[in-house]
Image (cartoon, rainbow, N blue to C red):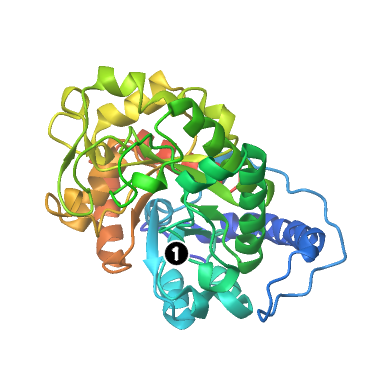
Amino acid sequence: MQADVDQDGRTLTAPIIRTTKRRFLVAAAAGAVLAAILMDYEVPGIPLPEPSTVEAPPPQAASCDTLIEPMSERQRVAQLVMVGVPGDVEAATKLVTDNQVGGIFVHSNPIQLLVEDRLAKVKAAAQLPLTVSIDEEGGRVQTVDPLAGSIPSAREMAATMSPEKVKAKAVDRGKFLSRMGVNMNLAPITDVSSQPDNTVIGDRSFSSDPATVKRYAAAFAAGLSETGVYPVIKHFPGHGNTTGDSHKTTVVTAPLAQLTTLDLVPYQRLTDYGKAGVMLGHLVVPDLTGNEPATVSPAAYKLLREQFGFDGLAMTDDLGAMRAISDRYDLPEAVLRAITAGADMALWSSGGRVAEVLNRLEQAARSGELPAQRLHDALRHVLVSKGLC
């Protein structure tokens, strides 16, 4: 592999790639052992890779600064984006090869992309281990049901199953995702809602009672984590009692004091969810974010970090396909505003305009418009979520 050089001729890529590749190989060996343990989970008709029988020692986490220091500005900002990929494996591989993004989002034609270990080719194109995410809540929001069967909605699970059974259901789905190559699930929902099933949240919520939401969401997250799939709870600061759909229009929540007594209750003691990320929704909280959606509001990230003590991965809801944000900002500007405000990873499902977005972020990093400390903090959270430091 030819090393990248910066404008002063310094080698940038080789040190970090050599170091990270070694860790990645060890992690891959450990993943093969996990696959061997999970061989009792079978998916009829879908060929699975043979597990290794050689057990490797766990990878040693490096200092985040050691990994970050030799990276170019382009490499750094690229790790902060998660891009939707098409079902075609060649197109997905090209997107990763050309842009070296930190993560991809699988949502289109999973039958083509997930079977026969095809994701392995996409992952191999990444110089740093790639986060592969999916939207697998259950009910009307699930992606792999054509391959693995359907799971109930959150509301149905809470009504008919114990938390222990919900955890087992999440373990079952997590095993499948892990063996297909997916390592992040944008679930469970922690929204509190009593609204009808077919509203924007509705039956995606476990309950109208925040304590019940917390109990069941924590069980679902624990089941995913047990299989090596990183859960992401959503949608901070709370979408369950709003009117309107942020896919279609601006959505305004109740005042912050009211959110604190209901919608924000599941975010108390975030360590109860284990190692998990938090997704912010495109939600306007008038006495917190002013007229801005939470995804681009420094006040919303400050609330999450300071009042709720969260030091994990904070990511955005879809910045490209939801009109609550896309009607306000062009995609490159929305991504920059979100990361500058406090997001660690910016998501857009369309997959287009990747180079344009990275150009804008790189320009902002070089000029100081994206402050160096904010970039460093975001990158640290991303690398920690990948288990690299």
The reply, left or right, for residue 297 in relation to residue 94 is: left
For the residue pair 388 and 88, the one nearer the viewer reads as 88
The residue under label 1 is: 100
Residue at image point 31% right, 45% down: 196
Up the image or down, 80 lies above or below 127; here it is above
Q: Amino acid at mark 1?
A: Gln
Foreground residue among 72 and 371: 371
In this rendering, the answer to whether 302 lies above or below 274 is above
**Residue shown at the point (25%, 47%) measured from the top left:** 336
> In the rendering, at what x and y percent does residue 201 appear?
33, 46
Picture coordinates of residue 277 (x, y %)? 48, 41
Residue 368 visible within the image: no
Q: Residue at x 61, y 48 (%)?
A: 224
Q: Residue furthest front?
A: 160
Residue at left 47%, top 59%? 134
Relative to residue 138, is residue 367 drawn left or right? Answer: left
